[in-house]
Structures are given as structure tokens and as C-alpha cells.
Image: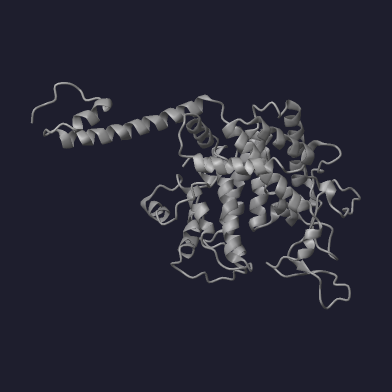
Amino acid sequence: MRLLRKPIHCRDSAKFARRPNGHATFLRRVGALCVSAIMFVSLLTASARAQQQKLPRVFLIDARKLAETKQLIQSGDKTFDPALAKLEADARQALQQKPLSVTTKAVTPPSGDKHDYMSQAPYFWPDPKSPNGLPYIRRDGERNPELNKITDHQTLDQMEAAVRTLSLAFFLKGNEEYAGKAAILLRAWFLDPATRMNPNLEYAQFIPGVNTGRGIGLIETRGLADVVDAIGLLQGSKSWTAADQRGLEDWFGKFLQWMQESRNGREENAAKNNHGTYYDLQAATFALFLTRNDLARQIVETAKQKRIALQIEPDGRQPLELERTKAWSYSNMNLDGLMWLARLAEDVDVDLWNYQTKDGRGIRPALEYLWPFAIGDQKWPYQQLGGFEGRSLFTLMRRADGHYRDEKFTRQLSKIPKLDPGTREHLLSGK
């Protein structure tokens, strides 16, 4: 075969491929390789530019992936257009959200101070054998509608959702209106003297006739870990001041101290099921936010034995979640929390993703145990009030992508339906 007299450049490959000679097939292949090379170089360039710009100070969100997404959007990449359009639609709706506060509830906590958060235990009902219904009795998995009379949990969820949306939209699009609204909502909940929440959960998930609050109530503030990330996404906004930042750091510092020292906080820390997992998730996030990396590292290191080894059997079952009336939901929920904890552990150079005890207890075995039920290969043998929904595991599988690169995991991922183009997960994962 006659050798080419000069090098072939990517810009010339398509021209040469059209020539009716023996090199056509070869050159078409060269052209395809060139396209692949260009795409690869583009991705490397976006990654390099993302590294050059200051990464957002976030912990649950992968800062590097999000920065790369932003760089691709700014460079004109249309891949994320549907997800970005949906995010902006959500952000415009969040602009209409009025400031929320614990002080708007109709009832007053035992302290006499409406600034104290208050909620009622969801799975406790009046005792039909008691004249006044007291003390309330447990009906696991069945939510008592009475709890809706106390609005703190609902308003907290609304504040968290709005702030997450607005801060992410600001970071990706740079619209200062989004940041300004997020700042207003954060100040109302955490900082303004007339509306701020006291940094404690003394009266969360009380049981009528039994107590005025429980450590279990800490599960209701797990979304505050997302709020910490939202604060990081507001960096660089003129709406978010140094005083705001100091104020939030002071609030979370006091809340973390309450978690560590109060009776309710110590009880939740000692919980062996998903409540203990989400205690660690919150404590580690707040520690990182406060630059207490040694504390965060201690929490995630301890989680190897205190959470993973204790909660997961060698075959991947989570017995303390399986005994619930919503065994599938709680198995997914606890594993979700452990995976978020593994994400935080990356920031302090601890690997929880691949940690396993000598007898095989770990995050990966827990995923493997749930997998055949999620795709319908096996029928779920435990109780699940409200119906079984296997798809809930798919989000966890996608989050594990990149940590488990073996052929088996890749094959499992191939069976998961593709995400809707408008799903926010595309923006956060960079895929």
C-alpha cells in the first residue's frame, strides 16, 4: 500500500474520505477517531477550566462535577438545556415563596417560645382504650394527620426546597435575583431576631401523654445538610454578605453543639438504625461547614463499625430496617444516608464506598442485596405499606457509578432506565 505523503489533519479527514480511492475506508475511520479525540479534548478542557475557577464550597454535591457542568453550559453545550430549563422554571416559582418561620405555628412549645422548633411523632395515635386517648400508642408506618396542625416540619421542608433550587439556579446562571431570594429565606429562618429558629430540637416529634420531644426528631432536620450546600453555592453573590455567612456559621455551630451535648442529641447519636446514620450525616456536614475537619473525619471513621458493620449483614440485609412496616422504603433510606456519608468521607480522605468488614458487610453488599428486588427478578419478602416501588433504588445505583467500575456493576447499570432529560440529576452529576 502506498504511504501517505503528508500527515492527515482532523480538519481534512472528511474531505479525503469522499475521494474514490483505496484510502476511503481508512480515512473515514480516521475521521471518526478525530471526532472522538476532539470530544475527549473538549471534556478535558472543560475539566481544566472548572479546576481553574474557584470550586463552590459544597459537601454533598460534587463540587468538581458541578463546576464542569457550569463550564460546559457557559461554553454553549446544549446537553443540559432541558434540565436547566426545568431548574429555572422551579426557581421562578421559588421566587414567589414568602419567607418561612417557626414562629408562624398556631401552637406554642412547652418552653413558651415559638422560636423553638416543634413537631408531633407521626406514627403515634390516640389509644382507643383510653378515655382521653392518652398516652398515644404506636402504629408504625401509619401517619397521624394530627401532626399537620403543627406546621414547623412542613415549613422547614418548604424553606429547604426553595433555597436548594434558588442557589443552584444562581450558581449555574448567575441571576442575582435567585441569590437575593435565597438570602431572604435563609435570613428569615436562621438570622432575623423576630423569626429565627432557636438552634435546638428539644420539642421535635413529641408523643402526647408520653414526652415533650425525642431524639428521633433529629431525622426531620436532615435536609439542613442540603442547606449548607446551598450556602456554598451563594458564594460570590452580592446578596450574600460576610455577616450572613458568619451568622449561619454561628447558628450551625450552636446546633452542632446541641446535637453533641443534649439528651435528645445523644440519644439520636446512639441510635442503631437509620436515625443514627442521619445523625452522622448532619454532624459530619456541619463539621465540614465549620472547618472542623478532624471532627468530620472522626465521625466517618467511626461510622465504619458504628453504622456499616452494625447495620448491614454479610449478605447485604439491613435487619433494623427490614423489621419496619415499610421495609423497602427504610432499607433504601438508610442506604441512601450511608452513601451520602460516603460522599462526605471523600472530603477527609476516608473511603466508605469500598469499606467492608472481614465477613463482607459494606455499602456495596447492601446495594447488591436490594438489586434483584428493584428490577423484579425477585419478589420483596418483607412488609411494605403503601406498595412496593423498585425504582427508588435506581437513584442510589447511579450515585454509586464511578465508585464501582467492575463488569457486574456496569451490567446492572445498563438495565436502569435513562433519566428524563429535564431531571436535575443531570446538572449535579454532569451526565
Residue at 16% in and 34% down: 24
Q: Is residue 295 visible?
A: no
Residue at 86% in and 39% down: 194
> Is the residue 257 above or below the residue 388 in the image?
above
Q: Quadrant of residue 20?
A: top left
- Closest to the observer: 218 or 16? 16
| Residue 429: percent from left, percent from top | 50, 42
Residue at 67% in and 46% down: 161
- Closest to the observer: 175 or 61? 175
| Residue 175: percent from left, percent from top | 63, 31
Tell me if 255 is positioned left or right of 291 in this view.
right
Tell me if 398 is positioned left or right of 109 in this view.
left
> Is the residue 77 above or below the residue 333 in the image?
above
> Is the residue 237 above or below the residue 301 in the image?
above
Tell me if 172 is positioned left or right of 13 in this view.
right
| Residue 103: percent from left, percent from top | 84, 47
Report the number of discs: 0
| Residue 197: percent from left, percent from top | 81, 43
Instruction: List the single residue furthest toward the right.
Output: 112
Quadrant (top left, top right, bottom left, bottom right) of the N terminus: top left
> Is the residue 416 above or below the residue 57 in the image?
below
- Closest to the observer: 362 or 339? 339
Instruction: List the single residue furthest toward the top.
Output: 6
Residue at 73% in and 26% down: 242
